[in-house]
Structure formats: structure tokens, C-alpha cells
Amino acid sequence: MAAIASNVTPNPIPNTNVVVLSLRKPLSCTFASNSRLFGNKFIGKSLSASIQRKRSDTARFAGLAPINASSSSHSFDVVIVGAGIIGMSIARQFLLESDLSVAVVDAAVPCSGATGAGQGYLWMVHKEPGNDKWELAMRSRKLWEMMAENVQQQGMNPLEILGWKKTGSLLVGKTPKQSAMLKRKVDQLSEAGLRAEFLSSCDLLLEEPALMVGEEGGAAFLPDDCQLDAQCTVAFIEKANRHFASEGRYAEFYHQPATSLLRSGSGEVKAVQTSKNILYSKKAVVIATGCWSGSLMHDLIGDSDIHLDVPVKPRKGHLLVLENLNSIKLNHGLMEVGYVDHEAAALDSSVSASGPVHAQISSISMTATMDAWGNLVLGSSRQFVGFDTEIDESIINCIWERAVEFFPALREFSLRDFRESREVRIGLRPYMPDGMPMIGPVPGLSNLFLAAGHEGEGLSLALGTAEMVANMVLGNPGKVDHAPFALESRSCMLQ
Ligand SMILES: Cc1cc2nc3c(=O)[nH]c(=O)nc-3n(C[C@H](O)[C@H](O)[C@H](O)COP(=O)(O)OP(=O)(O)OC[C@H]3O[C@@H](n4cnc5c(N)ncnc54)[C@H](O)[C@@H]3O)c2cc1C
């Protein structure tokens, strides 16, 4: 199906808004198989290739960077670089909560980064009450629930539109030590105000007959936890954003990487130069480019007198999607306790629990969900292998073997049985060494904001992040303390 291409009008006068919607592949959420459009390795590969190529000839930032005479220029209040879940949610927030005009720029299309691979859980079960991300996660969860309710109130089905399911979540353990830890976790989560329950192995069998944890095992159960489909949700947000295009408040600039920033003599960021356009911004430029944010920021400000290190690194993840598997039906979303350690494991530290797969830089932990179409989605891996997005069959084998340890019915099959009916999704999580996303103004560059580094929680934290960024730009009081996410308070940031 042809994509939208309307009003592609160059605007040499920076203060007039122009609606630009550029060509892209359409997203459909009607069939599970369509998710392959963005789930296969080739999108990611071509994306990283195009970025590499661009970077080598990127115009360096130096005060007012040279402007390509053939570029078209357009003007907006806010220019957002990156159309993953973070960038698209930020655009939505500005459009809904203000009268500002917004442009979204992407090197490729929405969901071509980590977002397109995401498993879709928005769970609290593995999160730590009281830690610095807790309030943001709670706020985000509330905003997600409001979005799903809103969809419902508009007469649509959140399952069809967002892949939304309130399945509840189970954090499962097999050993007495893990069960004791899970009981403490349930107490903590209950004290934090969530409905939480410890399930013994017998109770667990009733809830989840396909799961085997052994007599000593158990689970922390959060019945109110929800999941969504990342690609459907981004498609929904994008469609809603496009409603503002007719008012001249929204435009998309896809397939055009940002290459430099233009700034005034006083240091204010004035515009984003993409490979095709100059996008002037009156109020804010927001960089939301996931795992590319570190290198992009380096490229954007490389030759300036500002020394900034955004230490976001790509952390590769594989997911295995098995279609039409009738022998296993899950009632809830599941995750093994080892996931928590793996997520938090630092780049240089060793990984324990279910064990490292390759040296100390890779780990596998079992996650299992059923998507909106009844496919079994098995995860997940974590690897530090740069920007590589090739399928690694040895990792897929490890994901499979780990799942077999929890779901004995899978022993009837071999991975080869799914050659025709499997999908592998790969994404690069934006990993931060201190485990905290960076959200806030970039010191020394007024009008420039960063929202990146959400690692394995970008879907769950997206709406709270978007609200935080918009409140900062608009000067509104925040709902959540932004200090823990600020760039200047992180020792790794300013040198
Ligand atoms: C296997 C896997 C499973 C996951 N499961 C979950 C889950 O269940 N729940 C959860 O909360 N999180 C999950 N995550 C994490 C989540 O997907 C990420 O945290 C989130 O998608 C990050 O979103 P983002 O918008 O920051 O980055 P991305 O989605 O990576 O988007 C960044 C965008 O920036 C664009 N870009 C890059 N460079 C440029 C440039 N120079 N100019 C313009 N654009 C550029 C890219 O094209 C891309 O579209 C999972 C991740 C993986 C890999």
C-alpha cells in the first residue's frame, strides 16, 4: 500500500510551519505476520549501515554549521530526533498537552530501532520499589492504562489497536532461595501499593499449567500488570499524531538522519540539519535516538568547545516468536528471577544465575508472553556486540533451551520444527552503565534535550518520559522528580 506523501513543500522562511509527511512502509497491526516488516534483521542492518555511511561525511558542528544551499528549511516549535517509542511518545505529549508544532526526524522509520523488537511488557513485578526509577515507572504505568481506557472509550478494542492485554505477570524462581526472595519481593510490592501475591508451586500450577518450576519453586504474581504490542502502539500514536498535520502542527521527516546542529553565537540550538532539510526549532530540539544517542551526540557537538560523554551503548537482544503453537497456552506473562540480575549486570562484570552464554558479555534469561494473536514470544538475550544486528543461531538455541527448562511440553519439539513458523526479532537496547536513562536538558547547549538510555524498559517508561520532557520544555511542574535522570548530576557526563 502506498504511504502518505502530502504537502511536501520546501519552506525557505523559517517562521512558517509546513506539513511534510514523507514516504515510508505502512504498519499494519491486523496480522501477526506483518510484524515481520519491522522484526527482521534487514531493517536494523540497513539502518546501521546508513548511519555509518552518514557519519563519515557528517558536517561537524561548529557554532553555526555550514548550511547546504540545496536543503529545504522548515520551522517548528519542537524538533524530535528519533522515532522510536520514546521520540513518538514525546511528540504525542507535546501535541496533546500544548499548542506547539512538532517535527519528528528519523534515519529510517518508526520501530526500526529497539522499539520494533520489544516484547511489550509494562510490568512492575521485576522493578524495585523505592529505587530512582520507581516513580517514573508507576507514573508511566498509569499513563499507559489511561491510554488503553481512552481507546476503549472511543469505541475501539485496545487488544486490536494496541495489542493491550491485562494478563498479570509472574516472576518465577525454582530454588528455595529464590522463593524466599520472591516472598520478600511480594511484601515490598504490596507495601508500595500494588496488588501482589506469592504463589507456591502448587498454586502456580493452577495459574499456569504449562510451567514447571519444581516443588521448591514459586512466583511473585502481579495480577494488574499489562502488556502491549510495540509496533501496533507506535502505529496508533503515529496515526494520532498525524491528525495534527492538517493544523500545521505535525510533520515527519523519515529516511533522513540528523547530521548536525545549528546554533547561535550565544550557544542556543537553533536547528537540526538532516541529510535533506534544515529544521528550525523555536523552543526545543530533543534527541531520542536510543542506542545511537552517544555517537550521534558526539557527532553533533564533536568540534565544539563542549565536552560531553553520553555513555549509551547498544545491548543486543534476540526474541523468538513461535506461531500457531497450540500445545502451550499462557495465561500470564512470565519472567525468571535471573532476568533482574542480567538486566542490571554491567558491561564488564560477570553474569551468574542461569549462566553466561559467551564469556561475560552475554546472558540469557527466560521471558515468555503470548502476543495479541496467540503467538508464543520467548526471550531474551543480552549481548554487547556493538551495532551488529545479525541473527546468531547459537543465541536462539540458548533461548530455546532455557524455555524448555521451564516448559516441558516444548521437549516434544525441536527448533527445526519451527523453521517455517518462527520469527526472530533483534533490537539494540540503549544500555546505560548506571542503569538510569538520561532525561533532561543538555548542559551548555540551551534548547537541546536528551531522552535516551532506557535499556530494557523503554516501552514501560515511555509515557512518563514523554511527560517529563514536555513539562521541562513547557516549564510546567513535573509529576515525577527528574533530578535522578538529569545529565549534569551524572559524573560520567561532563569532563
Ligand atoms: C529483544 C528486546 C525486548 C524488549 N522488551 C521490552 C519490553 O518488553 N518492555 C520494555 O519496556 N522494553 C523492552 N525492550 C526495550 C525497549 O525496546 C527499548 O528500551 C526502547 O525501544 C528504546 O526506545 P528508543 O525510542 O529510545 O530507541 P529506538 O527504538 O532504538 O529508536 C531510536 C530511533 O532513532 C533513530 N535514529 C538513530 N540515529 C539517528 C539519526 N542520526 N537521525 C535520526 N534518527 C536516528 C533510529 O532510526 C530509531 O528509529 C526490549 C528491547 C529488546 C531489544
Image: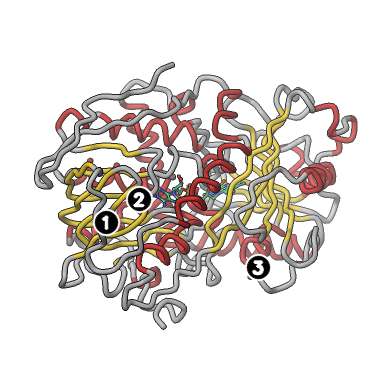
Q: 272 and 196: which one is in front?
A: 272
Please name the residue shown 49% across and 34% down the image.
Answer: 231
Q: 20 and 323: which one is in front?
A: 20
Q: Position of residue 472 (x, y in %)?
A: 24, 61
Please name the residue shown 64% across and 47% down the image.
Answer: 389
Which quarter of the rendered picture does the N terminus lie within? Answer: top left
For label 3, the residue is 345
- The amino acid beneath tag 1 is Val
Marks 1/2: CA distance? Answer: 8 Å
Q: 33 and 175: which one is in front?
A: 33
Marks 3/2: CA distance? Answer: 29 Å
Label 2 lies in ligand 1 vicinity (Cβ under 8 Å): yes
SS label for mark 3: loop
Disc 1 + disc 2, Cβ < 8 Å: yes
SS label for mark 2: strand
- The amino acid beneath tag 3 is Ala
Q: Is residue 212 visible?
A: no
Neighbour tally class for label 3: few under 14, some 14-19, many 20 plus, Cα within 10 Å: many
Vertically, is 434 above or below 241?
A: below
Marks 1/3: CA distance? Answer: 32 Å
- The amino acid beneath tag 2 is Val
For label 2, the residue is 81
In the image, taking residue 250 as reference, residue 451 lies left or right, namely right
The answer to which quarter of the image holds residue 236 is: top left
For label 1, the residue is 285
Disc 1 + disc 3, Cβ < 8 Å: no
